[in-house]
């Protein structure tokens, strides 16, 4: 059963990524390079860590996500958001600097907490961009990502807070992002 869920999570992830890539190439989505760079690094670290822990089919989706994240990062050079703010640079710097204490910790729980925090902070540039330009992000891809990640958590060989926290944090963050993006698309353009 975990193998079926692992394959299903990969298929769902690839469908979501196909929608996202199509949206990029059509000029509808302008991915933010800083967010995608951070996510690429974290997905690579996360998938390698789960492979070393022999997490089986539960890690497959994160590994495939890592590959697509690097592809999206590369596409940012030509198709990505060009407006980089000071707060975007601060989020990138914080995220990159936070990788150091993450790498130095010997405690797997603290490691996964740090990587989850870095992921959330790394999402900031995309959240800021989408707040100002709510139609420049493909929301359907985030729904597919959530489905993929939830299936990958179910497919984990050994479910624990250490193995499940990072993908669950991504799902929760994606859900909050989707609520905000839909709210902004409904014409709620007030700034707080």
Image: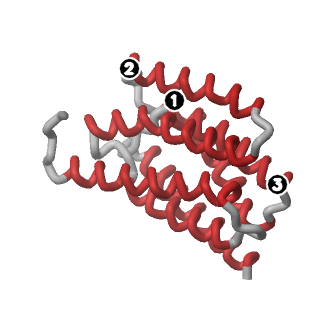
Q: Earlier in the sequence, mark 1 or mark 2?
A: 1
Is residue 44 found left or right of 166 in the rendered image? right
Q: Which mark is residue 115?
A: none
Residue 153: name its quadrant.
Answer: bottom right
Q: CA distance from mark 1 to mark 2?
A: 11 Å
- Measured from the top left, where is residue 185 in percent x and y? 21, 50
Q: Are marks 1 and 2 in contact (CB under 8 Å)?
A: no
Q: Which residue appears at 57% of the width and 36% of the height?
A: 118
- Which residue is labeled 3 in the image? 51
Q: Which residue appears at 70% of the width and 67% of the height?
A: 159
Task: Note whether residue 70 is visible.
Answer: no
Who is closer to the viewer here, 186 or 28? 186
Vertical arrangement, residue 72 with respect to residue 13, above or below: above
Q: Which residue appears at 70% of the width and 58% of the height?
A: 163
Count neighbours of disc 3 (C-alpha within 10 A) and say few if under 14, some if 14 to 19, many if 20 or more: some
Give the structural element (helix, strand or loop) at label 1.
Answer: helix
- Which residue is labeled 1 in the image? 34
- Measured from the top left, where is residue 101 in percent x and y? 69, 28
Count neighbours of disc 2 (C-alpha within 10 A) and say few if under 14, some if 14 to 19, many if 20 or more: few
- Which residue is labeled 2 in the image? 85
Give the structural element (helix, strand or loop) at label 2.
Answer: loop
Is residue 163 found left or right of 87 in the rendered image? right
Residue 143: name its quadrant.
Answer: bottom left
Count neighbours of disc 1 (C-alpha within 10 A) and say few if under 14, some if 14 to 19, many if 20 or more: many
Q: Earlier in the sequence, mark 1 or mark 3?
A: 1
Vertical arrangement, residue 78 with respect to residue 188, above or below: above
Q: Which residue appears at 83% of the width and 56% of the height?
A: 53
Give the structural element (helix, strand or loop) at label 3.
Answer: helix
């Amino acid at each position: 059963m975990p193998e079926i869920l692992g394959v299903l999570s990969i298929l769902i992830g690839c469908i979501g990524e196909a929608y996202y890539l199509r949206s990029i190439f059509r000029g509808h989505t302008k991915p933010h390079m800083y967010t995608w760079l951070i996510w690429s690094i974290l997905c690579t670290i996360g998938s390698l860590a789960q492979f070393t822990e022999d997490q089986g089919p539960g890690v497959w989706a994160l590994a495939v996500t890592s590959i697509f994240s690097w592809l999206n990062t590369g596409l940012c050079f030509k198709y990505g958001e060009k407006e980089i703010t000071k707060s975007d640079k601060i989020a990138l710097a914080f995220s990159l600097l936070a990788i150091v204490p993450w790498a130095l910790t010997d405690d797997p729980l603290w490691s996964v907490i740090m990587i989850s925090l870095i992921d959330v902070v790394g999402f900031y540039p995309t959240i800021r961009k989408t707040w100002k330009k709510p139609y420049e992000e493909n929301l359907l891809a985030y729904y597919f990502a959530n489905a993929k990640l939830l299936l990958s958590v179910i497919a984990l060989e050994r479910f624990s807070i250490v193995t499940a926290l990072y993908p669950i944090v991504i799902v929760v963050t994606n859900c909050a992002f989707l609520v905000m993006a839909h709210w902004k698309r409904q014409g709620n353009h007030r700034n707080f």
